[in-house]
């Protein structure tokens, strides 16, 4: 599948490609158009680890993905954690992107998107 960054709605082909790849790797995710500004892949219908995919407004071919916890502040307060699941999905996402020739210049960052210390792997 070739992903057209200009297809409408933006990101649909990318999100479907990632969803298919995760499912082929044995990870069932739910796909949703997220508020008409991006896409989400999640491990649960109403909660779970979420991968948010959004396009940079100034560059149709530059996309950002954020892997985030599905546990709210109360859950974290009582000690719940899904850190291992987040890290596992991040590793799978990196493998999917890395093995496809459609993606170049893949960079990872934990924390603020504006920080300068991006790395080529999600270590």
Image: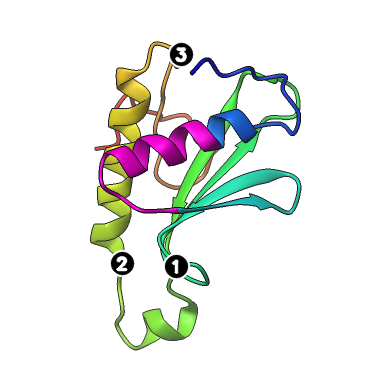
Query: Could you classify mark 3 by the number of other residues whose Cα lies within 10 Å: few (under 14), some (14-19), or many (20 or more)?
Result: few
Task: Identify residue for label 3.
Answer: 102
User: Which element type, helix, strand or loop, lies under badge 1?
Assistant: loop
Considering the image in quadrants, where does the C terminus appear? top left
**Image quadrant assignment for residue 55:** top right
User: Which element type, helix, strand or loop, lies under badge 2?
Assistant: loop
Is residue 113 depicted above or below 48 in this figure?
A: above
Q: Which residues are magenta?
A: 16-29
How many angstroms separate mark 2 from mark 1 (CA)?
A: 8 Å
Task: Identify residue for label 1.
Answer: 70
How many angstroms separate mark 3 from mark 1 (CA)?
A: 29 Å
Return the disc, 3 or 2, that comes first in the chain's sequence: 2
Where is residue 27 shown, x and y percent of the image?
A: 30, 50
Query: Could you classify mark 1 by the number of other residues whose Cα lies within 10 Å: few (under 14), some (14-19), or many (20 or more)?
Result: many
Say which residue appears at 34% left-offset and 44% top-offset: 23
Could you tell me if the residues under marks 3 and 1 are in contact, i.e. CB atoms within 8 Å? no
- The residue lying toward the viewer, choosing from 11 and 26, is 26
Is residue 81 depicted above or below 109 in this figure?
A: below
Task: Identify residue for label 2.
Answer: 82
Query: Could you classify mark 2 by the number of other residues whose Cα lies within 10 Å: few (under 14), some (14-19), or many (20 or more)?
Result: some
Is residue 24 depicted above or below 62 in this figure?
A: below
Closer to the eye: label 3 or 1:
3
- The residue lying toward the viewer, choosing from 14 and 54, is 14
Return the disc, 2 or 1, that comes first in the chain's sequence: 1
Say which residue appears at 31% left-offset and 79% top-offset: 80
Could you tell me if the residues under marks 2 and 1 are in contact, i.e. CB atoms within 8 Å? yes
- The residue lying toward the viewer, choosing from 21 and 59, is 21
Q: Main secondary structure of the magenta part?
A: helix
């Amino acid at each position: 599948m070739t992903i057209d960054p200009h297809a409408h709605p933006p990101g649909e082909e990318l999100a479907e490609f990632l969803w298919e790849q995760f499912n082929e790797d044995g990870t069932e995710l739910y796909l949703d158009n997220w508020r008409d500004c991006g896409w989400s892949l999640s491990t649960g219908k109403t909660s779970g680890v979420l991968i948010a995919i959004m396009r940079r407004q100034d560059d149709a071919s530059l996309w950002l993905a954020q892997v985030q916890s599905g546990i709210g502040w109360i859950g974290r307060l009582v000690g719940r954690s899904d850190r291992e699941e987040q890290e596992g999905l991040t590793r799978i996402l990196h493998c999917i992107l890395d093995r496809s020739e459609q993606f170049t210049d893949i960079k990872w960052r934990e924390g603020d998107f504006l920080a300068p210390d991006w790395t080529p792997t999600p270590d």
